[in-house]
Amino acid sequence: MRTLPSPATARHALAVVVVACLTGLTACSGEAAETGPASPAESSEPTDPGVVQVQPGAPGEPATTLDADAVVGGPGWNHDDLAFVQMMVPHHQQALEMAELAESRADSPEVAGLAARIEAAQGPEILLMAGWLAEQGVEVPEPSDDPSAWDHSSHGHSGMAGMLDAEQMAALAEAEGVEFDRLFLEGMISHHEGAVEMALDALVGGQDQRVLELADDVNAGQSAEIARMRRMLADL
């Protein structure tokens, strides 16, 4: 079993990766690498014939069922891939900030445990996305950046959905106990719903296999957590 880094380790590693990645990189609107990453080598492991992949269709169109060994995405990457990854880095970063507050403010052990799992999952995903962006030769968002600076809605994409505004984050930081639990769950449900929306957009329009796999993980994992948080909120 792969051991995930602790939240503190993940945050420190992120800072190191981001500083390294920013050296000599171009902006989204600038000149990027001419070609995307090469397609990963095919796995030699046998595929379970009973497993299928479901690729979401465009709005109003049905999903497509693929064989388990079908490769989703093609060589290279497009702007849908880039938009998803560049927006998801600060999106995940805010989730880490929210989860960190729960360490000292949450009343419910379930809420504290959920926050710890969010940190353990999303910290490594930030490192993964920062590495992907650096590999493509495009800018990596810094933790100190204004998240709106990375919103790709001006490029014709959906915006960075689900982000809490400054007033909501301030209210969460000031709350304690049961009130914190309520605000945390309400905010994180909205935050996760935004991430799922962005992931589905990437699954429809993206091209890079690694990005599509990450988007699929975000969609599946955060959809499950949304259902769980709604139950927790109802029990408060």
Image (cartoon, rainbow, N blue to C red):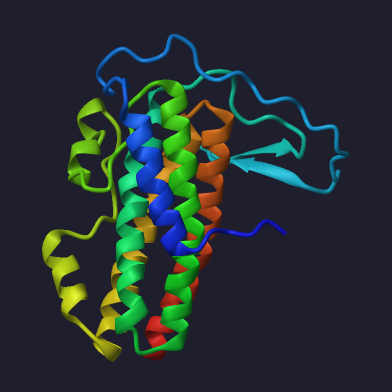
The location of residue 146, given as percent across then percent down, is 17, 45
Q: Nearer the viewer, residue 94 or 159?
A: 94
The location of residue 159, given as percent across then percent down, is 26, 41
Q: Nearer the viewer, residue 199 or 60?
A: 199
Placement of 40 over or under 97, stated as above or below? above
Give the position of the N terminus as an image quadrant. bottom right
Q: Is residue 116 left or right of residue 87?
A: right
Would residue 60 be visible to someone looking at this image? no
The location of residue 133, given as percent across then percent down, is 42, 30
Q: Quadrant location of residue 184? A: bottom left
Identify which residue is drawn at 47% across, 25% down.
Answer: 135
The location of residue 94, given as percent across then percent down, is 30, 57
Give the position of the C terminus as an image quadrant. bottom left
Would residue 23 be visible to someone looking at this image? yes
Identify which residue is drawn at 26% across, 28% down.
Answer: 156
Q: Is residue 101 left or right of residue 165?
A: right
Placement of 20 over or under 88, stated as above or below? above
Identify which residue is drawn at 38% across, 82% down.
Answer: 233
- Count the marks: 0
Identify which residue is drawn at 59% across, 27% down.
Answer: 73
Q: Nearer the viewer, residue 15 or 35?
A: 15
Determine the residue located farthest toward the top in the rendered image. 34
